[in-house]
Every structure is written in structure tokens, then in C-alpha cells.
Amino acid sequence: MPWSQVYDPLGNVLLSTAFAALPIVVLLGSLGVLRIRAHYAAVLGLTTSFVMAVVVFRMPVAMTVGSAVYGAAYGLFPIGWIVVNVIFLYQLTQECGLFARLRHSITGLTEDRRLQLLLIAFSFGAFIEGACGFGTPVAVTGAILIGLGFTPMSASSLALIANTAPVAFGALGAPLIGLQGVTGLDLKQLSAMVGRQLPLFSMIVPFWLIWAFAGFRGMIEIWPAILVAGVAFAVPQFLVSNFHGPWLVDVAAAFVSLAALTAFLKVWKPARIWRSEEDRSQESGVRSQDKLESGFTKDEETSAASEHARSDSAIRNPQSAILRPWLPWIILSIVVFVWGLPQTKTFLDGIAAPKIPIYGLDKLVSRVPPVVAKPTPESAVFNFNVLSASGSGILLAAIIAGFAMRFSVGGMLRVYWKTLKLVRNSLLTIAAMMAIGFTTRYSGMDATLGLAFAKTGWFYPFFGTMLGWMGVALTGSDTSSNVLFGSLQKITATQLGLSPILMGAANSSGGVMGKMIDAQSIVVASTATRWEGHEGDILRRVFFHSLALAALVGILVMLQAYVFKAMIVK
């Protein structure tokens, strides 16, 4: 039987909004405040969302169960599928000693930890985001940073902070393509508008990233390199987004940033080199006893010493070609880029991409005004595109790289089994957390929260941006946030006399800052860095950064709406 969402079930906006927010409060509070392990926190959050959906928002029990099952399935595929295969590739490189040689390859370019962080987390991570997105860059860069000797806390939190500015154009423009689909707004205008917002943050984020890791003084010591990396990314990001479209923005900008930073480091070196975490504590002067300005403790920063020793012992041929340690990651980059091309996806989906409607849910739940212009049935179709999925491309890349590293088929199967055992708890956590997101979506709780933001009047450009931030924090995807709130942004902007293009873009630009605190990304980061069970610690570390950066995006959108109106695409 069809069911229409109700956005004020209690007849009191404040109470309805409070109950809609309760699953989020329980989940994030359990993780960040009570420090409950992620899988237990996810179960608590899922239980709360189920009760709220059924009791408060009056969603039929069968539909609530269907939405939770749909979310859990999506958590395992495609998200979990990405995580498993990235960790598989990482495990292969660890077993044959190439990761140790990769570390030496990077230190051959620069021994400074801050510059390594710029190269890997910001520039290389942006390329992976542009090619396939959906959690892949956090998994890849987190694994590489661990291999370089960064601690799990540093690797996790810094990979999350770095994976922000490129997200709106990730997966070959998927977030904006989704936004265009639900709003009917012009895709190239949306691309150009986002391209007039995020380039500023593409210059801010690398400075912010190094400040979070090294403190203010440590950041100032390498400001020329940070500026090169940021500007070399921001300029192509602006040009491609405004004059071409959203598809190749990140790929082009990341390539230019990597090339420019690499060339710059050939001719410039900082006055002081941070070769290790101990050197950092002795040289930088930013530590007060055993704690950095950025909040990283000495114990956290030195715990990777044994990993260094193990990696060094794995080096068998230090005279091998400089590109060999990068070979698995070059293969990965090429394959995921080709996998992400629309032509490739269309071809592979034509071979095998069954779409499975969720029984009792598909087209039976309707969003209604004012969230949408007219009642719109919500689709609930599980797309089992097993061939075209990013995770399948990563698996193929790992197999090719495995043969290149001279693994036998039996050897790769052994490592894959080891990987499955390593990530099994994280997969369950991802599934439960995605179940929460889908339950809040189909019950209408997300729209209730969105409508609360829409009542802010003159301040809506700021709070509309924060709505995008909240959407990504809830769903784990800028694409999903745009699909959920894109129509609401357009309707509200029109009612308030604002540009729908501006507010549609603001939803995506604000959303990218929520990427670092969404449960899915945090679990991916903890899994990639082998720090399962510390998701609450990671959340507390990055929450301020996420909120502050999102607020800055909101301020920029306010200025564009009322002061710098010439920046708005018409």
C-alpha cells in the first residue's frame, strides 16, 4: 500500500525536528562522546531510527524494514566492495615489500612528512576522488600514509580532511549530475557555480591540512609548497568547471597539482626537514610536552616505529627502477579512471547489471510538497552493477598488480582471505550505518531536518549550505545529499528570491565538508589504517574541522547571494 511522508507528525515543528534528529544524536553521541565501539553505536543508531520511523513518523513496519535492508545492502555493495579490494591491494604490496620501497621512493623526493602528506593525501587523493569517489580516496591514501609511517590517528583524520574540496566533482562529476537530475537545472551552470565556490577552498584546505598535522609554525615553514599545490589545483578546477563541465575537473586539477608540486620540490626544500615524528617533536617547536598544537599526542605519533622496522626489512632490491614501487598504484589509477568513464560503465552494465526492486518499498513511498513541487514516488532499486562498480575495477587492478608483483593465484587467494578476515567487522559496521541513513531518508526524517533549515529566511544561503553539509554527514555521499535536498534547495531559493543555481551549488559545495564526518568515511578510514574500534576518536578529531570549513563555505555563499552577485552564474 502506498504511503506518503509526513514532515511534522507531532503538529509541532520543534518536537518533530528533535525526534528526527534523535538517530543522528544517538549515533554520533555514542561514537564521539560515550566512545562506544562503532558496531555497537551503529546498532543503537539503527534501533533509534527504526523506532522513530515507526512510532513518530508512522511509517509502516514492512517499509521500515525494507529501507533498513536496502541501506545495509548498499553498505556492502558498492561501499564495502571498494574497501575490501583497496585493502587487498594494500596487503599485496605489504607482503612483497613494495610498500616499504614506495615509502623510500617518496622520501627520495622529499623526506619531510608535511610534504609527503601534501603529495599523497591532497594531490593524489584528489585524483582518486575524481576517478571513482565513493570512499576510495580515503581508503587508498589512508593505507599509503600508514605505509609511510604515519600513525593510525594521523593517517585516518588527515585523509578525511584532505578529501573535501574535490568531492563535488568526484566520480567524474556524479554529484552534480545527480543534482541536475532532481532539479532540472542546467548541468554546466551548476558546474560553473560550484567552480566559483570551491577553488577558494582548494587553496585553503592544503594549508588547513598541514596546520591540523603540524601546527601553525610547521605550516608556515612550508607555505610555498602548500601554495603551489593549492593554486595548481584551484586554477584548473575553476577553468575546467566553468568552460568544460563537471566530468574531468578533479582528474585534470589533480594531475596539474601533482606535477607542479613534484617539479617545485626538485628546486625547493624547507629550512627544516621533518623526517620522523621524533624529529618533528625536537625540531618544530610546536609541541607542548607530549602534545601538538594540532592535538596529536606523542604516543600516537611514535607508535609506528615498529612498522618502520618491518617495512625496512622487506626491501630486497634498493637499486630497482624508481617507478616499480608505484606500479600497483599506477595500475589502480589507470584502471579506476577507465572504469569510471561513461562509455565503460555503459558497456559493462550492458553485460550484467541486474536492478532489483526492493519489495514493499520501491515506488510506494512518496515525497510531498514542500520538499518537492508535487508528490513524487521514491524509487528503491538495488543496482547490482557488479561489473561496472568501482570496487570491481579496483579488484581487477589488484589482480593485475598481483601478477606484476609475481604472486601466484593461490598466493592472491590467501591474501584475499586474510583481507576478508581483517575487514569483516568494519563491513558489518558500514552496513548498519548505511541502514540508518536509508531509514531516515525513506521515513522523511531527513526532509524534516531540511525544512527546519529552510525556515531561516534571510540567513538561508548560510543554512542552506549547512543543509548540504548535514546531508552528506547523514548519507555519506555528496551525490545522495544532492538527490535528497536538491529539489528543496531549488524550491526554497525561488520562494526567497535567491538564485536556484546558487543554492543548488551551495548544497554540493557545503556537502563536501560533511564528507569527513560521515559514518561511512570514518569506518573506511579506520579500516584502511587498521584502527578499527577507534571511530569515535577519529570523529572527535575531525568534527571541528568539518564544521568550521562548512561554516566558511556558508559565509562565502552568503556573500555571493547579497554582496558579490556578479559571481552567480546566469
Image (cartoon, grey):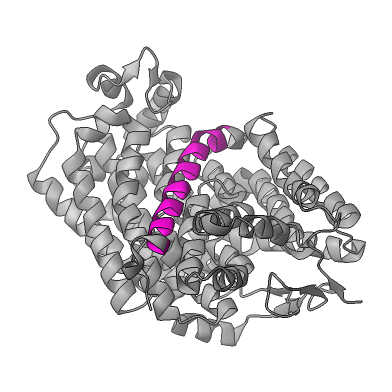
Provide residue 61's location: percent of width, then percent of height. Answer: 91, 61
Mark count: 0
Task: Give the residue drawn at x 51%, y 57%.
Answer: 465
Q: Residue furthest left?
A: 267
Relative vertical location of residue 309 with respect to residue 448 in this rendering, above or below? above
Name the residue nearer the viewer: 215 or 386: 215
Q: Main secondary structure of the magenta part?
A: helix
The N terminus is located in which quarter?
bottom right
- Is 252 located above or below residue 552 in the figure? below
State whether residue 388 appears in this view.
Answer: no
Residue positioned 26% across, 71% down in the render: 239
State left or right for residue 38 relative to residue 263: right
Residue 428 spot, x, y in % from top left = 70, 49
Q: Please check the rendered image and state whether residue 301 is part of the magenta-colored stretch, yes or no.
A: no
Q: Is residue 66 left or right of residue 351?
A: right
Q: Report the magenta residues as a range.
A: 537-561
Q: Name the foreground residue: 203 vs 162.
A: 203
Confirm whether the magenta stretch covers residue 554: yes
Task: Tell me residue 201's x, y (percent).
Answer: 34, 53
Q: Provide residue 84's location: percent of width, then percent of height.
A: 57, 54
Residue 43 visible within the image: yes
Q: Quadrant of the C terminus?
A: bottom left
Drawn side of residue 509 relative to residue 464, left or right:
left
Q: In the figure, 93 relative to 129: above or below?
A: above
Picture residue at 47% right of the left edge, 62% below the top? 506
Q: Quadrant of residue 302?
A: top left
Seen from this angle, which residue lies furthest top?
Answer: 289
Vertical placement of residue 194 versus 185, above or below: above
Q: Residue at x 23, y 62 (%)?
A: 256
Observer-nearest residue: 456 or 567?
456
